[in-house]
Image (cartoon, grey):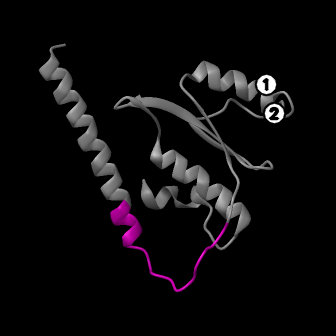
Amino acid sequence: MSFWNWLKSKQKKAEIAAKCFNDYQRWFTSLDKTEEDVDLTLTIRVRAFGTQQEKQSAWDTDWRSKHPTWGKVSAGTNVSSDPPELWMDLRMCRGGLIINPAILGHELLHSIHNTDKRVVNPDLLIGDIY
């Protein structure tokens, strides 16, 4: 692939990501406003892995060994432990590490919901967003 085709490919991916971000924000701003506040201090362990093999191996050792009925770890998982653990994939972008913002936000919402039940379980929003 030529440099220019590679660059176009990267720009197209960036445009798709920006559109998803904007669509998500448009959905969020369409919701009813509230006078309520949420003010929490949470300690959370983030477990992000560059390969599925690394992530699955750590999952099997740390959690599946204790809970044999649990399946494989998905792209994003929240473990209701103390502290809560957010498991997710890790990639490289612009010379640095990046976690999928949508997955990070979704899994973080689980931890917030588990602390304050006024906050909606994000799994109930999937039909609204996607």
Q: Which residues are magenta?
A: 25-40
- Depicted 115 relative to depicted 68: above or below: below
Camera-side mark, 2 or 1 = 1
- Kind of residue at badge 2: Thr
Marks 2/1 in contact by CB < 8 Å: the verdict is: no
Looking at the rendering, in which quadrant would you find the N terminus?
top left
**37 is within the stretch colored magenta:** yes
Q: Secondary structure at mark 1?
A: helix
- Foreground pick, 92 / 66: 92
Q: Is residue 77 above or below residue 93?
A: below
Q: Earlier in the sequence, mark 2 or mark 1?
A: 1
Q: Residue at 76%, 25% (x, y): give it.
A: 60
Seen as rendered, the residue at the extreme bottom is 35
**Residue occupying the point 46% across, 47% down:** 101
Q: Residue at x 47, y 48 (%)?
A: 102
Q: Is residue 30 left or right of residue 44?
A: left
Predominant secondary structure in magenta? loop
Going by the image, does 102 lie left or right of 9? right
Residue under pointer 1? 61
